[in-house]
């Protein structure tokens, strides 16, 4: 059995140890907010936080998550109560098809510097095929500071 | 075909000692560190049915230690930790800069230096920096420990001279005797992040008081089956002033130590031309 914390809740997983974290999150825990893009660690769509740091969940076998903390987009907010970062994405049109958004939100939620240049560098590992990035960057830079994101 | 979880066997040692012992008893197992390259292959169905030695439970090989001779980087230190380590950034900035361009944040947080070496990609971004710093790879197996100079660790594309049952414990980098006069790290890829290098260079040069070259160290990745030092060019410039003529001869000699190929990422001609430009710019800057 593998025990981990997902969005603050203790979870136990009893399936095969070499299942990918993204599949465990989506299939075993029903957390379908995390999306699979390329499955090769190139696009950033499946990014979750592992012990508070962005990581590609398509490249992590769940056996490596024993005893660790995972945060997914479901941990940020929900449709009724979006967090400030999510609200900013909605307000500044940082979302088009939305497939890359959960991964971008997770990486952006950990950014210390949020000037445009730092945000562009910080999001370099995320591909968006809709927006051309301008609105995404703006959504992050215009998120009100001072509150927990 | 996709990765099939049920086809996999996973050994999960909880200490270095247990890892060595489990690997000795299961020499066909594949050690797994951050998995950032292995999982790509596995996801595509290219590694089903294997037995893995998951090193994520091993705590001993995760720190950067200062020794009298230099830094000893644990095999399971991540690229993010290399990128952010203040001592490494001061003493071995080329390695810190290389670590900062491996994949992107979400890969740097997972991929390890030891895993990078065991994976032995010709395009690994950290290898040219390790080559100019003349790093040593430390290993352990049931037979004991050994030290391999970095360049002798690799035997070909994705091949190492590590034996079954042998694990990398640390990468030792000796302090430089003197600060270099100039240094270079440059990765040339298609995208700012996640790119696999077309060519990747690291270099150090020390000059005498009369501006002649005391020592040049120049290494290239993605230009041969394994990382290469430009021995012919390094030897040629020794004791000479760095004039345009000297740089031109060094650039001509560059090809003696590499064998670039055409592949999906670039062409041999482009790789050679860009690498020569990097060498020329470095020598004449």
Image (spheres, coloured by chain):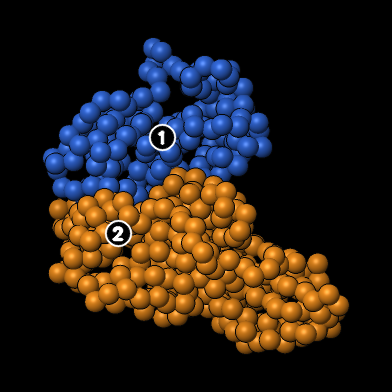
Where is residue B251 drawn, in percent x and y? 72, 81
The residue under label 2 is B32
Residue depicted at 57% across the width and 52% down the height = B87
Do discs 2 and 1 belong to a common subunit?
Answer: no
The front one of B34 and A79 is: B34
Q: Position of residue B285 (x, y in %)?
A: 81, 67
Q: Where does the N terminus of chain B fall, quadrant-wise?
A: bottom left
The hue of chain A in the figure is blue
Residue B128 place in picture, x, y as percent: 56, 69
Q: Reply above or below: B141 against B7.
A: below
Asked whether B210 or A12 is in front, the reply is: B210
Q: Which residue appears at 27% of the width and 31% of the height?
A: A5
Q: What colour do you see for chain B?
A: orange
Quadrant position of residue B245: bottom right
Going by the image, does A51 lie left or right of B184?
Answer: left
SS at mark 1? loop
In terms of depth relative to the viewer, which is nearer, A143 or B12? B12
Image location of residue A8, percent across then percent down: 30, 25
Mark 2–mark 1 distance (CA, rounded to whole Å):
22 Å
Q: Residue at x 43, y 39 (%)?
A: A54
Q: Is residue A63 above or below residue B274?
A: above
In-image side of A138 versus A90 (left or right): right
- Residue ID for mark 1: A52
Disc 1 sits on a residue from what chain?
A
- Tell me, yes or no, if residue B258 can be seen here: yes
For label 2, the crowd category at 10 Å Cα-Cα, with few meaning under 14, some 14 to 19 and many 20 or more, is: many
Question: Could you classify mark 1 by the number of other residues whose Cα lies within 10 Å: few (under 14), some (14-19), or many (20 or more)?
Answer: some
């Amino acid at each position: 059995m593998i025990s981990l914390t997902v969005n603050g809740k203790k979870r136990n997983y009893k399936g095969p140890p070499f299942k990918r974290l993204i599949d465990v999150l989506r299939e075993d825990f029903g957390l379908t907010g995390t999306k699979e893009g390329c499955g090769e660690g190139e696009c950033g769509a499946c990014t979750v936080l592992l012990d508070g740091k962005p990581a590609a969940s398509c490249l992590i076998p769940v056996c490596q998550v024993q005893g660790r903390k995972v945060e997914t987009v479901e941990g940020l907010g929900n449709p009724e109560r979006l967090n400030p970062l999510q609200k900013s994405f909605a307000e500044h049109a940082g979302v088009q098809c939305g497939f890359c958004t959960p991964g971008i939100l997770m990486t952006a939620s950990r950014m210390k510097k949020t000037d445009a240049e730092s945000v562009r560098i910080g999001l370099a590992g995320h591909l968006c095929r809709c927006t051309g990035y301008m609105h995404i960057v703006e959504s992050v830079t215009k998120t009100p500071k001072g509150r927990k994101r | 075909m996709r990765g099939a979880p049920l086809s996999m066997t996973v050994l999960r040692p909880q200490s270095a000692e247990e890892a060595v012992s489990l690997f000795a008893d299961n020499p066909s197992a594949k050690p797994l560190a951050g998995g950032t390259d292995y999982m790509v292959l596995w996801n595509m169905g290219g590694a089903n049915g294997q037995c893995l030695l998951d090193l994520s439970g091993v705590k001993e090989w995760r720190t950067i230690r200062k020794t009298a001779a230099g830094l000893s980087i644990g095999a399971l230190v991540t690229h993010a930790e290399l990128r952010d380590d203040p001592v490494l950034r001061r003493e071995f900035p080329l390695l810190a800069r290389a670590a900062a361009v491996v994949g992107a944040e979400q890969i740097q947080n997972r991929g390890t230096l030891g895993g990078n070496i065991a994976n032995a990609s010709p395009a690994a971004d950290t290898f040219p920096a390790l080559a100019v710093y003349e790093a040593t790879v430390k290993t352990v197996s049931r037979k004991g420990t050994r030290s391999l100079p970095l360049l002798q660790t690799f035997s070909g594309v994705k091949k190492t001279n590590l034996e079954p049952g042998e694990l990398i414990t640390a990468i030792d980098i000796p302090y430089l005797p003197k600060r270099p006069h100039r240094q270079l790290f440059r990765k040339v890829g298609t995208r700012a992040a996640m790119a696999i290098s077309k060519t990747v260079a690291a270099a150090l040069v020390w000059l005498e008081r009369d501006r002649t070259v005391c020592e040049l160290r120049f290494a290239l990745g993605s230009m041969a089956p394994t990382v290469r030092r430009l021995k012919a060019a390094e030897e040629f410039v020794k004791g000479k002033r760095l004039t345009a003529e000297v740089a031109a001869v060094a650039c001509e000699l560059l090809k003696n130590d590499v064998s670039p190929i055409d592949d999906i990422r670039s062409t041999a001609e482009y790789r050679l031309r860009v690498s020569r430009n990097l060498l020329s710019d470095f020598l004449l800057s």
